[in-house]
């Protein structure tokens, strides 16, 4: 069942008809259920990896993955705020003269 849900999630667009044959769009029929199944599968895989690492005596790596982005305890990205987090847009001057 989980494999079928993950396959459906990967191969079906949000606005496509649902593969179950209900006649509804995928986003109105099975999308949320399939996303929840994927989320549970990822959480289970992460828990198994954590247990395996703990069993082997490997410590968690707490080094930042990107110098300007911090990560919370659960791996959630914490975006920086303030003047340094604003992207700078580069513009080029317009060419002189018309057509």
Image (spheres, helix red, strand yellow):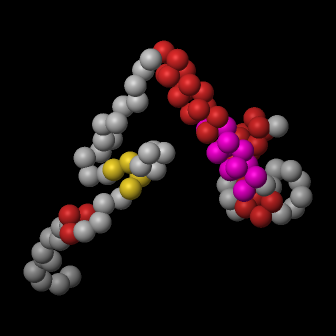
Instruction: Classify the position of the N terminus by image quarter.
Output: top right
Q: Nearer the viewer, residue 10 or 68?
A: 68
Whether residue 49 can be seen here:
yes
Residue 51 is left or right of residue 41, and the answer is: left
**Residue range of the region highlighted in magenta in the rendering:** 32-42
Residue lying furthest bottom: 98
Task: Tell me the chief SS of the magenta region.
Answer: helix
| As drawn, 96 above or below 31 | below
Residue drawn where x is 87% and y is 61% of the image: 23
What residue is at 20 percent from the left and 82 percent from the top? 99
Residue at 56% in and 25% down: 51
Q: Position of residue 38 (x, y in %)?
A: 67, 43
Residue 72, x across and y down, in percent: 41, 49
Name of the residue lying farthest toward the left:
96
Nearer-the-camera pick, 18 or 70: 70
51 relative to 88, above or below: above
Q: Position of residue 92 (x, y in %)?
A: 15, 70
Asked if residue 90 is positioned above or below residue 1 in the image, the reply reads below
- Name the residue located 29 percent from the left edge and 66 percent from the top edge: 81
Q: Is residue 98 left or right of residue 63?
A: left
23 or 71: nearer the eye? Answer: 71
- In the picture provided, is 90 more to the left or to the right than 21? left
């Amino acid at each position: 069942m989980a494999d079928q849900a993950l396959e459906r999630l990967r191969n079906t667009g949000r606005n496509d008809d649902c593969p179950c044959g209900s006649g509804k769009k995928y986003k109105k029929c099975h999308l949320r259920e399939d996303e929840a199944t994927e989320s549970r599968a990822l959480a289970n895989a992460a828990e198994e990896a954590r247990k395996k690492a703990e069993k082997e005596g490997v410590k968690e790596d707490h080094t930042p993955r990107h110098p300007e982005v911090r990560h919370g305890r659960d791996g959630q990205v914490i975006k920086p705020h303030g003047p340094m987090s604003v992207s700078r847009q580069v513009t080029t001057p317009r060419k002189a003269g018309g057509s």
